[in-house]
Amino acid sequence: MTRALPDELLKLPHRTDVPFSKLTTLGVGGNCRWLFEPTTEEEAQIFVRACVREDLPYRVLGGGSNLVILGDIEIPVLRLRFPAELQREGLKLKAPASFGHIRMAQGAASEGLGGMEYASGIPGTTGGALRMNAGAYGTELVDILDTFRFLNLDGEIVEKRPDPGEFKYRWSFLTAGYVGLSFTVKLAEGHRETIAAKVAENMGKRGSSQPLSKRNAGCIFKNPPGQSAGRLIDQCGLKGFRVGDAEVSPEHANFLINHGHATALEFAELMNTVRAKVSDVFGIELEPEVEIWP
């Protein structure tokens, strides 16, 4: 993108030429030419409205934990930097979209509120969790979601309750252009010690079965109906299969890991190889669970 950005955008908090290796958990990708980091809903609204008015495409970045970036991004990227605070009202807990998802689960436990224990093993931000309808251990965010706030495609702030069809397995209608701002979950009163123990147990499960010592983007592929993507990849003999510094994790086959110097092209080749092998052996087309840019 060679066109100049409008002054209205350039007055917002922003940085230029930020490597995506510093913005994602996987640590690959090219250069983020324009990274805008609003600290208020009003600034986020200015960003979206300016982009809409100028017919300027943009992308929305959360914690970078469910994302594979395969090149430079020249268009503006929005990453919210709201004040990190939880708000409790009775059995409800509200978090801004830039709040850590795991941290919210821990915060709920410290308040003696049960229902978010599933999130203790899911990295990233609450905004990313809303966008992907994050879930684990048989629970999804939509199961406890009370209300959520977002910027629509016209830059208007909307607050609503979830309606049928808006959230599905690892999907929501909040696709490209929408910006999640916050959400409120409805939880249940419980014993702090019991809830905290479950949070710790889920964290332990994640640590024992996933390659946390290596940079990764989380589960790469969605589980096909009635199947486990990791088990299918494992049965194809691909654990430990490597392209350069990119590898199918020997611990969990649905994790692709970066040994430190993997390139975007190596990850693209590795993902394509895994999908092709599973398709050849089982006739199943794996769908990415991660977002892929561009």
Image (cartoon, helix red, strand yellow):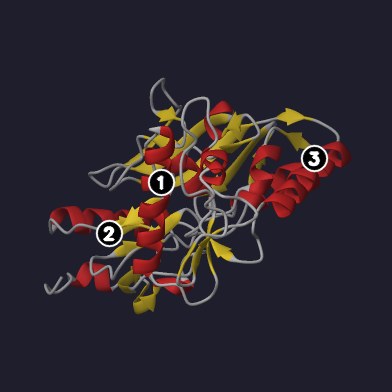
Is residue 286 visible in the rendered image? The answer is no
Position in image of residue 287 (x %, y %): 38, 40
Of residues 233 and 94, the one nearer the viewer is: 233
Mark 2 Cα shell of 10 Å, populated few (<14), some (14-19), many (≥20): few
Q: Quote the CA–CA distance across marks 2 and 1.
A: 24 Å
Type of amino acid at the residue the image marks with label 3:
Lys
Residue at 53% from the left image edge and 30% from the top image edge: 227
Is residue 4 placed above or below 99 in the rendered structure?
below
Which residue does the numbered mark 1 point to in the structure image?
Answer: 277
* Image quadrant occupied by the C terminus: bottom left
Q: Nearer the viewer, mark 2 or mark 1?
A: 1
> Furthest-top residue in view?
164
Residues at discs 1 and 3 in contact (Cβ within 8 Å)? no
Residue at 69% from the left image edge and 32% from the top image edge: 115
Task: Say which label, 2 or 1, has the lower sequence index.
Answer: 1
Of residues 203 and 273, the one nearer the viewer is: 273
Which residue does the numbered mark 3 point to in the structure image?
Answer: 198
- Using residue 258 as the reference point, say whether residue 79 is left or right of it: left
Position in image of residue 19 (x %, y %): 39, 76
Type of amino acid at the residue the image marks with label 1:
Lys
Residue at 86% from the left image edge and 34% from the top image edge: 191
Which residue does the numbered mark 2 point to in the structure image?
Answer: 294
Q: Quote the CA–CA distance across marks 3 and 2.
A: 38 Å
Type of amino acid at the residue the image marks with label 2:
Pro
Residue 43 sits in quarter = bottom left
Q: Secondary structure at mark 3?
A: helix
Residue 47 sits in quarter = bottom left
Q: Nearer the viewer, mark 1 or mark 3?
A: 1
